Amino acid sequence: MTPSYCDDFESGNIGWSSQIAPGGNPGTNWELGAPNFQSTTGGNGGSLNAWDINLNTTYNDNANCDLYSPYFDFSTIGAGRIEFFINYNLEDGFDGGD
């Protein structure tokens, strides 16, 4: 089955948005580009770009930011799925993601 939507992030931003949550540190946010810091050094499967928090630096204390996908209408789909690759490095006992 051919996917009806596929985004390797190499064509720029096509509908994604990021936002610092209330109370979040304004020095930390999602960025689209080529990650180059510690364990995130590129996209998945040969892609150069990815969405990453601060592409070239660590995230700051009290970071709280959201990444929103484009809107997907599943109302006419009988069966479907969403797949994505995630790479993360969180400080044990302090950080999290959902």
Image (cartoon, rainbow, N blue to C red):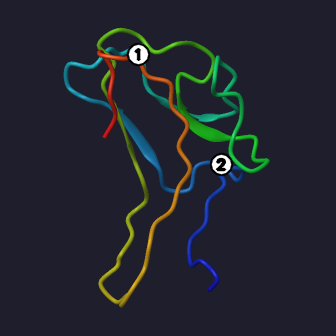
* Frontmost residue, 80 versus 9: 80
70 lies left or right of 84: left
71 lies left or right of 46: left
Query: Considering only vertical position in the picture, is 35 above or below 85?
Result: above
Task: Return the x and y of residue 96 as percentages of the image width and height.
Answer: 32, 28
- Residue at the spot x=20%, y=19% of the render? 23
- Residue at the spot x=51%, y=31% of the render? 88
User: Which of the numbered marks, if any, corresponds to residue 12?
Assistant: 2
The amino acid type, in three-letter code, at marker 1 is: Glu
- Residue at the spot x=33%, y=21% of the render? 95
User: Which of the numbered marks, if any, corresponds to residue 91?
Assistant: 1
Q: Which label sits in the foreground, 2 or 1?
A: 1
Instruction: Say which element carries label 1.
Output: loop
43 lies left or right of 96: right
To which quarter of the image does residue 24 belong?
A: top left
Query: Considering only vertical position in the picture, is 43 above or below 57?
Result: below
Query: Considering only vertical position in the picture, is 79 above or below 14?
Result: below
Task: Return the x and y of residue 62 as percentages of the image width and height.
Answer: 29, 13
Spatial separation of the CA atoms under disc 2 and disc 1:
30 Å
Instruction: Say which element carries label 2.
Output: loop
* Frontmost residue, 24 versus 12: 24
Task: Return the x and y of residue 13 as percentages of the image width and height.
Answer: 58, 49
| Disc nearer the start of the sequence (2/1) | 2
To which quarter of the image does residue 31 belong?
A: top right
Image quarter of the C terminus: top left
Task: Return the x and y of residue 27 as percentages of the image width and height.
Answer: 42, 13
User: Which of the numbered marks, if any, corresponds to residue 30?
Assistant: none
The amino acid type, in three-letter code, at marker 2 is: Gly
